[in-house]
Image (spheres, grey):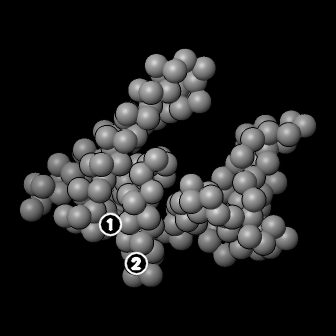
Amino acid sequence: MTHDVAALAVELTDMAAADHRTAVHANSDDPAEQLAWRRLTARHGDRLGEIMAEYGWPTAELVGDEAARAAWLIAQHADRQLDIQRRALQLMQQAVSAGAAGPRELAFLRDRTLVNEGRQQVYGTQIAGVKDGAPVPWPCEEPERVDELRATVGIEPFDEYVARFS
């Protein structure tokens, strides 16, 4: 089992590295590049589904900090696999409740899943686009409380967050 977990950690970090290398193609003007990105994230999402079925949520305690973050990134980018995203959200919620995962990452995954379901997000982490040079979030359930809600999970205020994108 120890060897399996070590191999799993390497596999997750390798997938995240591939994700980082190709993420630039997510919104490419070249359809072939976009397709390559979609195939990669779908393959990773499928594999994460298998990992979750076998191990549950890959926590830092199980696979180490870097691989746990990689699992979160893979779930975050499984945009066309809502079943995988929802399962990751459920397992990660349990891990956060048990103190085995971070509420900040969970908040990002919750928002991403809600947006992919066509619903309003909670924390304003998902950006719809840019208007007059300023990033605009997808609609939020309680826009007037976004910064207060963000603070509860350790996310900086919205204006500070989007300043990094402009």
| C-alpha separation, residue under disc 2 versus residue under disc 1 | 9 Å
Write the residue at 24% across / 57% down.
Answer: 51
Amino acid found under the numbered disc labelled 1: Trp
Q: Position of residue 10 (x, y in %)?
A: 24, 45
Q: Is residue 99 visible?
A: no
Residue occupying image coordinates x 62% and y 71% = 153
Asked whether, in this view, residue 108 is left or right of residue 127, the answer is left
Name the residue located 55 percent from the left edge and 17 percent from the top edge: 30
**Label 1 residue SS:** loop
Marks 2 and 1 in Cβ contact (< 8 Å): yes
Q: Farthest residue to the front: give it.
A: 118
* Residue bearing mark 1: 57
Report if residue 122 is visible in the image: yes
Q: Residues within 10 Å of mark 1 (few under 14, many from 20)?
A: many
For the view shown, which residue lies furthest in the bottom direction?
A: 98
Residue in the foreground of this view, choosing between 111 and 107? 111
**Residue 58, relative to residue 7: is it above or below?**
below
How crowded pointer 2 is (Cα within 10 Å; few <14, some 14-19, many 20+) is rated as: some
Q: Nearer the viewer, residue 140 or 153?
A: 140
The quadrant of the picture occupied by the C terminus is top right
Residue identified by numbered label 2: 94
